[in-house]
Image (tube, helix red, strand yellow):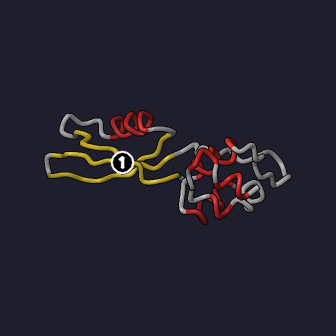
Amino acid sequence: MVQQLDSFRGRRSKIDPFVELVGKLADSEVAKRAGVTTQNVRTWRKRRGIPAHSQGVGPSKPEVPSRWAFKVLVELKTGNREYITFGEDIVEAAEHAARQLRSDDARILSLEVVGVAL
């Protein structure tokens, strides 16, 4: 089976050495070990028909985080300032930042994803 997976479409993948773990561990754990994203592992696994790892306890955990943290760079009369805001996506984060900065003197210069919010 490993030989067949190694030659899938004639390309080698960073995930190939971890084939024995795919489906036995969570995609996120295999991704950490292989140095790739969880989405890379999920796609690799699905293309090969390997079922996902199941912990067997309760409903499966959603793969997409519901809240993100964003760094907001704001231009003020006194200079630029950085803030952190949260949202389900960049649009919600931008809207929240704009509401909080209700000033004609403040202008959002950029929003950058910091990471998943706990």
Residue at the spot of label 1: 112
Please name the residue shown 83% across and 48% down the image.
Answer: 58
Q: Position of residue 13 (x, y in %)?
A: 57, 55
Toward the right, the furthest residue is 56
Q: Nearer the viewer, residue 45 or 111?
A: 45
Mark 1 Cα within 10 Å, few/some/many (few <14, many 20+)? few
Measured as percent of width and height from the top left, residue 86 is found at: 46, 45
Give the side of residue 38 with respect to residue 70, left or right.
right
Q: In the picture shown, does residue 98 fall above or below 19?
A: above
Mark 1 lies on a secondary structure that is: strand
Vertical arrangement, residue 79 with respect to residue 21, above or below: above
> Mark 1 belongs to which amino acid?
Glu
Number of marks present in the image shown: 1
The residue lying at 76 percent from left, 47 percent from top is 50
Residue in the image at 64% along x and 55% along y:
6
Residue 102: image location, x then y, percent: 29, 35
Q: Nearer the viewer, residue 118 or 76?
A: 118
Q: Position of residue 62 (x, y in %)?
A: 68, 44
Can you say which quadrant of the picture contains the C terminus?
Answer: bottom right
Q: Residue at x 70, y 59 (%)?
A: 19
Q: Which of these two is toward me, 20 or 67?
A: 20
Say which quadrant the N terminus sits in. Answer: bottom right
